[in-house]
Image (cartoon, grey):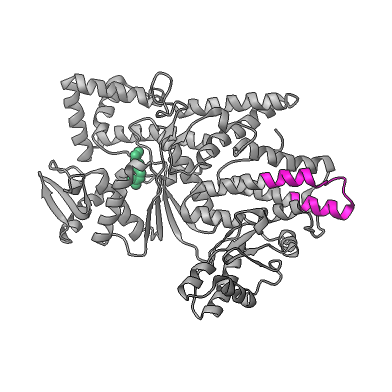
């Protein structure tokens, strides 16, 4: 149950009864604990519209509002805010009830999430790491809320670079081992292409052969793609990302549709030829000089572009997948590309009007010097090496904290904590800003970090170990009496709200803030309220509260693709 929605519905019903017309209640979490748990901020706006005194309207609303059994008697504050404090009995019954902390929506949508999507010709880089991590969290959250999620890994597997890569692969007899270092392989091929006209000539012939469906060129290309994809998959598996080979819907999958895309644009009267290239000009897109900006869909040599493929992908996502919503996770530099593609697709009727197209941009990943994240030598950071370092740093952390644990267990914990730290550091920031990759910050045991949350979880588990209690066997009713119990109960029940908001806006950091607050409230409760030494009834109640807190923490971390451990 989404408590915020419940409160909002109740206040809105009362507002409508008072005004004779609907008005938004604007229920939000209280800005300060003294104001209660939530506040309704919509009264002032409504009062202004009908020129009534807001406090008088607030009083009227409260006379109509049916909040019995949900909140304590509400208070009117300041110019007309309504402060809402959830009733302790309500909280206790919600926590006691065996209901899931996360319920599925009654309006499920089909949501395509286009994420990771590296170019297979080159090494996957940190930009794809962000896309992979954020996209996977969104896919998991949407799925947990009952939506039908279709993952689409729109990998770049087509284009002229494959000519030189395949030629270089043939010349060197390169095996899959050499392709593991794709970065170097690509650079070698490129150098030969630039320096050796004969090589460049053969590369161009390979492109032509590939595009005209030559069996041998096709087979070599397929081998290259398979190897490259298998390295991506290994990384996904290591990261605990839910992408599989079945989610790959590569650029090349649209090859046969591209001519049709251009033909339809032509029929719709949207095409213009400019310098021999076929383009769509839309009046809403102009450059700095006020000149219209083209979306080029076919070059003068007949070749198609990134934009053409994306238009074809949209037709597929609308016509075949019947998506209600499509999310694209790429860095912010592609913002214009997507705005243009969405506008052209709508103009051409490739997507129905109700289908929501959302680019979810993110900023760059920066090093601690504030410059783009690179190795000390200025090269591309290999993602595998990055994760190695995360694990070895986490191992040092665990070893310092719990040297008594067996080495194998410490290694196991380090994997979960290290990978979790890298993912959480990315997810917990507002994705639209650049973010500074900082080992010390992400592995800190205090603050809004994965290790802190994982540690809070182990604290909960250790209560049960020390008390020798199986949380499944607790049956008594929960009582909510102390302020720390109240605050913890409210926070546990907010999981639904946090997940729904993250899904609606595409911001996993909402969920991270929720989890950080949950862990903080748990730690406060743990300090303030004795558990195992309390009298039997209180002990049982507090243990159940602990169990529910643990459940929310584990579930919430799981939605982010982060695992928990029993001890650390
Ligand atoms: N391959 C592209 C890149 O590496 C990202 C693709 C994103 N998805 C899309 N449908 N354009 O920049």
Look at 15% across and 48% down and name the residue there. Answer: 278
Where does the image place residue 365, in percent across and percent down from the top left?
43, 34
What is the number of callouts on the image?
0
Quadrant (top left/top right/bottom left/bottom right) for the N terminus: bottom right
Pick whichever, 483 or 204, lies toward us. Answer: 483
**Magenta-tinted stretch:** 520-546
Residue 407 shows up from this direction:
yes
Query: Can you see residue 155?
Result: no
Q: Position of residue 489 (x, y in %)?
A: 71, 55
Q: From the top left corner, tell me how far across and down residue 187 is, in percent.
A: 30, 23
Residue 565: x and y in percent read 67, 38
**Is residue 86 rendered to the left or right of residue 15?**
right
| Residue 268 figure quarter | bottom left
Q: Nearer the viewer, residue 257 or 96?
A: 96
- In reply to whether residue 532 is colored magenta, the answer given is yes
Residue 399 on the magenta span: no
Q: From this view, report whether residue 25 is shown above or below residue 229.
A: below
Instruction: Write the residue at 84% across / 51% down.
Output: 539
* Front residue of 64 and 116: 64
| Left or right of residue 84: residue 464 | right
Residue at the spot 30% in from the left edge and 51% down from the top edge: 339
Above-or-below relation of 493 to 14: above
Task: Say if 110 sits above or below 125 in the image.
Answer: below
């Amino acid at each position: 149950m989404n408590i915020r929605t419940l409160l909002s519905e109740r206040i809105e019903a009362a507002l409508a009864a008072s005004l004779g017309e609907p008005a938004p209640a604007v229920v939000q979490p209280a800005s300060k604990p003294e104001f209660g748990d939530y506040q309704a901020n919509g009264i002032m706006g409504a009062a202004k519209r009908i020129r009534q005194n807001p406090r008088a309207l607030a009083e009227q609303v409260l006379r109509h509002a049916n909040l019995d059994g949900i909140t304590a008697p509400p208070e009117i504050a300041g110019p007309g805010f309504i402060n809402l404090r959830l009733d302790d009995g309500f909280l206790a019954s919600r926590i006691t009830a065996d209901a899931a902390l996360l319920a599925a929506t009654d309006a499920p949508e089909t949501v395509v999430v286009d994420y990771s999507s590296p170019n297979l010709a080159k090494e996957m880089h940190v930009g794809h790491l962000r896309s992979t991590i954020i996209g996977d969290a969104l896919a998991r959250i949407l799925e947990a809320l009952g939506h039908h999620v279709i993952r689409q890994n729109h990998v770049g597997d087509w284009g002229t670079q494959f000519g030189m890569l395949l030629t270089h692969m043939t010349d060197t007899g390169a095996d899959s081992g050499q392709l593991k270092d794709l970065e170097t392989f690509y650079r070698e091929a490129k150098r030969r292409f630039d320096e050796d006209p004969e090589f460049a000539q053969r590369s161009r012939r390979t492109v032509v052969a590939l595009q005209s469906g030559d069996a041998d060129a096709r087979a070599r290309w397929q081998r290259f793609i398979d190897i490259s994809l298998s390295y991506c998959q290994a990384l996904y598996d290591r990261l605990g990302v839910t992408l599989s080979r079945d989610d790959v819907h590569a650029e090349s999958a649209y090859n046969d549709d591209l001519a049709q895309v251009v033909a339809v644009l032509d029929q719709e009267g949207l095409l213009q030829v400019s310098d021999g290239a076929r383009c769509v000009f839309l009046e809403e897109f102009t450059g700095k000089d006020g000149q219209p900006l083209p979306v080029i869909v076919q070059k003068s040599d007949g070749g198609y572009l990134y934009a053409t493929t994306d238009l074809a992908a949209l037709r597929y996502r609308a016509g075949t997948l019947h998506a209600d919503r499509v999310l694209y996770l790429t860095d912010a530099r592609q913002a214009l590309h997507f705005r243009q593609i969405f506008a052209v697709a709508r103009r051409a009727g490739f997507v129905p009007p109700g289908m929501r197209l959302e680019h979810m941009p993110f900023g760059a990943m920066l090093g601690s010097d504030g410059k783009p994240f690179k190795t000390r030598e200025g090269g591309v950071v290999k993602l595998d090496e990055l994760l190695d370092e995360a694990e070895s740093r986490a191992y040092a952390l665990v070893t310092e904290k719990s040297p008594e644990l067996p080495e194998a267990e410490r290694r196991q914990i380090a994997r979960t904590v290290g990978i979790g730290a890298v993912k959480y550091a990315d997810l917990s920031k507002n994705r639209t800003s650049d973010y500074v990759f900082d080992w010390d910050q992400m592995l800190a045991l205090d603050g809004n970090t994965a290790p802190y949350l994982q540690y809070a979880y182990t604290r909960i588990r250790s209560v049960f170990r020390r008390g020798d209690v199986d949380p499944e066997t607790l049956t008594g009713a929960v009582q909510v009496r102390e302020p720390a119990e109240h605050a913890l109960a409210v926070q546990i029940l907010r999981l639904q709200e946090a997940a729904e908001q993250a899904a609606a806006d595409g911001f996993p950091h909402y969920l991270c803030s929720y989890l950080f607050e949950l862990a903080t409230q748990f730690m406060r409760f743990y300090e303030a309220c004795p558990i195992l030494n309390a009298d039997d009834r209180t002990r049982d109640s507090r243990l159940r509260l602990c169990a529910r807190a643990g459940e929310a923490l584990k579930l919430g971390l799981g939605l982010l693709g982060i695992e928990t451990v029993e001890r650390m």
